[in-house]
Each structure stands twice: as structure tokens, then as C-alpha cells.
């Protein structure tokens, strides 16, 4: 076998390994997080048991704790930890509704962009080549109304957050639109969960427990989100009717 043949076989393998490396790092980080017992600390019981310590920590080191919170949120979203949403409650408890929501949006957007780039680097081209005619048609429609489609995916809580982070990377969407729709689309949900966290202290003081089940489907929360989703659909509907011959 010639040297040229060996080099030609080695290059694709090296290229594939390079493309998959970010996903490998993310998978290793997620495995390490579980192995070290990370999920035991990201839950409401931990917040309830350590609320006085955490409140004192914020009071004495606000900037450092706030930046650390953003970094931790970005890390957990970046490794696709499904329970990262509990940090939204922590954010509201630690920093209040609006400051907490701001930290949530920044951290979640950074983390979502990390996993988006990792998936696109590893699988984006491969998946695009294997998509059938239907998915190609869907991708074409998506590309015409990227911001609207992506914004709706973020607003309407039909799919887990980490799933919505990954799926757009498999299509030829612009990173700029992905990042913008993520940052804007998660604001309503971030405000809801941060407000719950903001009121958690009073609930815990009375010996009560936080009830998260069904929060996002309550009419006072769901109706405004549906309204925003309908507004986001206007460009899609307009372009569809515009494309039809008169």
C-alpha cells in the first residue's frame, strides 16, 4: 500500500475525530456531572435546605455569585443536563425576579449556543445529506422564516429545552437567528420561573413546598405565551399567502 493511500485513509478518520471531539467532551462532562452526584444538588430540596446560606452568600458576594450562576447555567445547558431548568428557580430565589431572569437568559443562551455549535460541527452536514424530500421541504420553509419558527419553538413549551437546542443545528439555520430567537424566546418562561423562585423564601418559611407541576400550563401563564406565538406566526402566514398566485 502506498504512502498516498495511507494518508488518504487517515485524513477522513482524523477529520471525523476532530468533528466529533466537541460532542465527546460534552458527553464526558455530562457523565462526570452524574458520577460526581451533581443532580443531588440541582433540586428544590437543596434550595430549601440551604436557603439561608445561599442568601448570605449573595449578600456578601453579589457580583461573583451572579457571574458564577451564569457560568453554571451555561455549563449545564451546554452539556444538555435535563434538570438545568431547576436553576431558574435558584436564580429567582438568589437575585429576584428580574435580575434572576436576566442571568437565566444570558446563561441559557450561552449554553444553548455551545451545544448548537458542537452538534452542527459533528452532525450538521451529515444529517443534511441524508434528509429525505419531506425534510428538505421543511428545511426550505424553515430557512424562509427562521426567526419566526425558532421563536415559536422557544415560546411554546411542547418540547424539552435541550431538544430544541439540538434540532435546529441539524438544519441550515443561521447561528445569528438561533442565538437571537433563543435569547428572546426564553424571556417569558424565565420570568415565570424566576418569579416562583423569588417567592420561594416565604413559602419555605411557612413550611410549604413549591409546586412546579402544571406551572407553564396555567391560563395566566399560557395565554400570554400563546399570544406571543401567534404574533411570531404572522410573518409565516404572510409569506405563505404572498407566495400564492393571485
Image: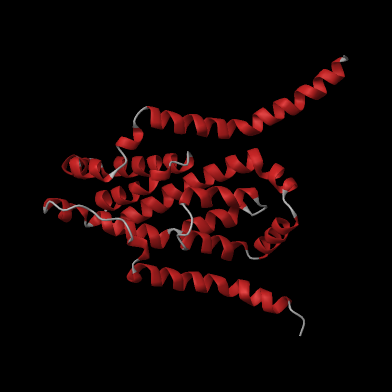
Q: Residue at x 34, y 30 (%)?
A: 37
Q: Residue at x 42, y 44 (%)?
A: 82
Residue with the most extreme left position: 206
Quadrant position of the C terminus in the picture: bottom right
Quadrant position of the N terminus in the picture: top right
Residue 195 location, quadrant: bottom left
- Is residue 115 shown left or right of residue 48? right
| Residue 203 in view in this figure | yes
Residue with the most extreme bottom position: 246
- Count of numbered tags: 0
Picture coordinates of residue 20 (x, y %)?
Answer: 62, 32
| Residue 58 in view in this figure | no
Q: Residue at x 24, y 56 (%)?
A: 198
Picture coordinates of residue 216 (x, y %)?
Answer: 36, 62
Question: Which is nearer the eye, 134 or 49?
Answer: 134
Picture coordinates of residue 190 (x, y %)?
Answer: 37, 57
Residue 146 location, quadrant: bottom right
- Is residue 90 shown left or right of residue 190? left
94 above or below 227?
Answer: above
- Is residue 132 shown left or right of residue 32? right
Q: Residue at x 50, y 47 (%)?
A: 112
Picture coordinates of residue 32 (x, y %)?
Answer: 43, 28
- Is residue 208 shown left or right of residue 103? left
What's the colour scheme? secondary structure
229 above or below 245?
Answer: above
Amino acid at each position: 500500500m502506498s504512502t498516498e493511500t495511507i494518508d488518504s485513509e487517515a485524513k477522513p478518520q482524523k477529520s471525523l475525530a476532530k468533528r466529533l471531539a466537541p460532542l465527546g467532551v460534552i458527553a464526558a462532562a455530562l457523565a462526570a456531572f452524574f458520577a460526581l452526584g451533581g443532580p443531588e444538588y440541582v433540586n428544590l430540596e437543596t434550595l430549601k435546605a440551604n436557603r439561608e446560606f445561599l442568601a448570605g452568600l449573595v449578600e456578601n458576594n453579589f457580583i461573583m455569585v451572579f457571574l458564577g450562576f451564569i457560568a453554571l447555567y451555561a455549563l449545564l445547558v451546554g452539556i444538555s443536563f435535563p434538570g438545568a431548568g431547576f436553576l431558574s428557580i435558584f436564580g429567582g430565589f438568589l437575585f429576584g425576579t428580574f435580575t434572576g431572569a436576566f442571568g437565566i437568559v444570558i446563561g441559557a443562551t450561552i449554553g444553548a449556543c455551545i451545544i448548537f455549535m458542537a452538534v452542527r460541527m459533528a452532525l450538521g452536514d451529515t444529517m443534511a445529506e441524508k434528509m429525505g424530500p419531506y425534510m428538505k421541504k421543511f428545511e426550505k420553509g424553515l430557512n424562509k422564516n427562521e426567526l419566526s419558527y425558532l421563536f415559536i419553538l422557544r415560546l411554546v413549551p411542547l418540547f424539552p429545552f435541550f431538544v430544541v437546542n439540538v434540532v435546529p443545528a441539524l438544519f441550515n439555520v443561521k447561528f445569528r437567528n438561533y442565538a437571537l430567537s433563543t435569547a428572546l424566546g426564553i424571556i417569558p418562561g424565565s420570568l415565570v420561573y424566576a418569579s416562583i423562585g423569588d417567592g420561594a423564601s416565604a413559602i419555605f418559611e411557612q413550611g410549604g413546598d413549591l409546586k412546579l407541576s402544571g406551572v407553564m400550563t396555567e391560563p395566566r401563564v399560557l395565554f400570554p405565551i400563546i399570544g406571543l406565538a401567534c404574533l411570531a406566526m404572522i410573518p409565516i402566514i404572510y409569506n405563505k399567502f404572498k407566495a400564492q398566485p393571485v
